[in-house]
Amino acid sequence: MASFSLRYLAVVHLVFLFVSGVCGVRFRITNNCGYTVWPGVLAGAGGESLSTSGFVLGHGESRTLEMPALWSGRLWGRTHCFTDGSTGKFSCATGDCGSGHLECSGGGVSPPATLAEFTLGGSGDMDFFDVSLVDGYNLPMLVTPEASSASVGNCRATGCAVDLNGLCPSDLRVELLSQSGGEGQSVACRSACEAFGRPEFCCSGAYGNPNTCKPSSYSQLFKNACPRAYSYAYDDATSTFTCATGTSYAITFCPTTTSQKAGEKTPAAAVPLINDTMVFLGAVSEQSDATLLLPTGRQAVAAAVAVAWLTLHDWINF
């Protein structure tokens, strides 16, 4: 009897996963930035490849990817991309995957880049997802699950809606050189691990466990601006989110007006909600009750002071 029950549960589980796939798990990827973004996609080891591993989205454009119910991988945005007229090689100033083509074709992301990471159909019939700044940051990103499954798990929007390139300390900043020879444009912000390679920043060696690897002043800058995003390797408690397997997700680049630079077109942003001490920006989907925590005026000033301190700290100690 027990053997029959186990077989029955296994069949029900397989049928559930099959139906989830047939009903259509989808990633709807939208570019609300005032500039072109070239999304890249990489499946995990042994994972099923998608219909594309790299494409282009102009301002306001969207593309929907059909996803397997069981899949793991990551998605990111590439910026400032071009094709060399003499060699035909395609490359990007940030988020490049090294393939030399629009399609990444199994190539991984070159940091710094904002990453959306997914495990679909994981333990307990749950999806696990996060937005990570562990490898640095290049543009704002929001991941929003469909509201239909919001009551299951910790199923809420996550991401980083803040333009961190403007807050980035000088020793972490990646600049695109000006053709006129003037001051370069800040296009990405490196992690302290990539910038300095020190074990305490990389959570490696003696710092390779959560007891010894703690947030640094650099990762805390990211965390203060984007509380739900991963800021360092062991930031799991506040940065991993779960939804029922079969959920579809909206992935939006530049999801709010705060991530737009002067002169850029204003996207269809969610309405901000204000409480006594903090400013919340709602998720892109109006059906979702998920919110992202963003700095208020006092917090923004504190972030600016932190940047100045970090710059001085670096000048003295390095």
Image: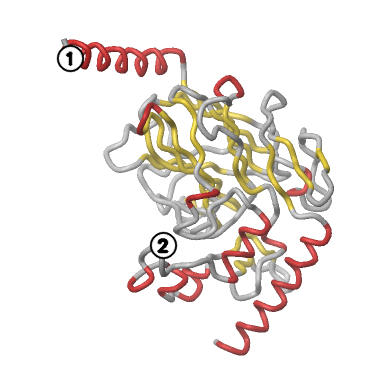
Residue drawn at 31 percent across, 36 percent down? 47
Which circle's residue, 1 or 2, is located before the other in the chain?
Answer: 1
Dot 2 falls on a residue whose secondary structure is loop
For the N terminus, give its image quadrant. top left
For residue 166, above or below residue 151? below
Image location of residue 116, percent across then percent down: 51, 43
- Amino acid at dot 2: Pro
Residue drawn at 47 percent across, 71 percent down? 201
Q: Which residue is mark 2?
A: 210
For residue 133, above or below residue 125? below
Image location of residue 157, percent across then percent down: 61, 37
Image location of residue 280, percent across then percent down: 76, 43
Q: Which mark is residue 2?
A: 1
Q: Which of these two is toward me, 252 or 56?
A: 252
Protein image colouring: secondary structure
Task: Please state if 227 lies on the left or on the right of 132 as rendered.
Answer: right
Pointer 2: residues within 10 angstroms few (<14), some, or many (20+)? few
- Amino acid at dot 1: Ala
Dot 1 falls on a residue whose secondary structure is helix
Q: Which of these two is toward me, 139 or 220?
A: 220
Residue drawn at 55 percent across, 56 percent down? 94
